[in-house]
Amino acid sequence: MDTEYKLIFTAESRNEIKKIYNYISKELYAEGAAKELMEKIEESVNNLKHFPFMHQKVDKYGGVNKEYRRVVVKNFIIIYDIEKDNKTVYIDHIFYGGSNYSNKI
């Protein structure tokens, strides 16, 4: 039986999710699309509880000591890291895929 990993959203990732939702629902007047995106993000993140190592590693930038991985959800990239010892997945950031997110990690 697989051990389930705990999920923790950083303050930055929670803020980024709110900004994404507000932009799509209020600036683009597409609340349905915003809700659909949030559901897809939630589904992808919940899969990490059981399969945290299934996604691609992100190249290391600027002397970062952590090993980051990424999940692509529509036009967005979820950046996360894993702490094996305490079975925890940290959702670090959620970026628009068209942005240069590598220098923001």
Image (spheres, helix red, strand yellow):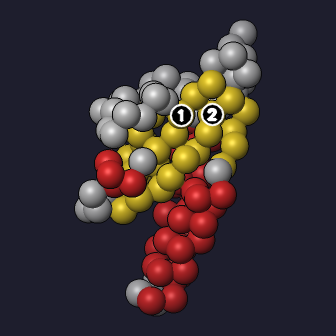
State whether residue 50 is above or below residue 45: above
Q: Which residue is drawn at 63% across and 18% down?
A: 84
The earlier-in-sequence mark between 1 and 2 is: 1
Q: Name the residue under label 1.
A: 81
Q: Mark 2 points at which residue?
A: 89
Image coordinates of residue 51 in percent, x first then y, are 55, 25
Calculate the distance from the C-alpha at mark 1 to the C-alpha at mark 2: 6 Å
Q: Residue at x 70, y 23 (%)?
A: 87
State whether residue 84 is above or below residue 103: above
State whether residue 26 is above or below residue 42: below
Q: In which quarter of the image is residue 4?
A: top right
Kindly check if marks 1 and 2 are in contact, taking CB atoms under 8 A apart as contact.
Answer: yes
Q: Residue at x 47, y 56 (%)?
A: 94
Residue sitting farthest toward the top: 1
Q: In which quarter of the image is residue 6?
A: top right
User: Residue 28 shows which numbered tag?
Assistant: none
State whether residue 60 is above or below residue 87: below
Q: Using residue 50 as the reference point, say whether residue 36 is left or right of it.
A: left
**Callout 2 amino acid:** Val
Q: What element carries label 2?
A: strand
**Callout 1 amino acid:** Asp
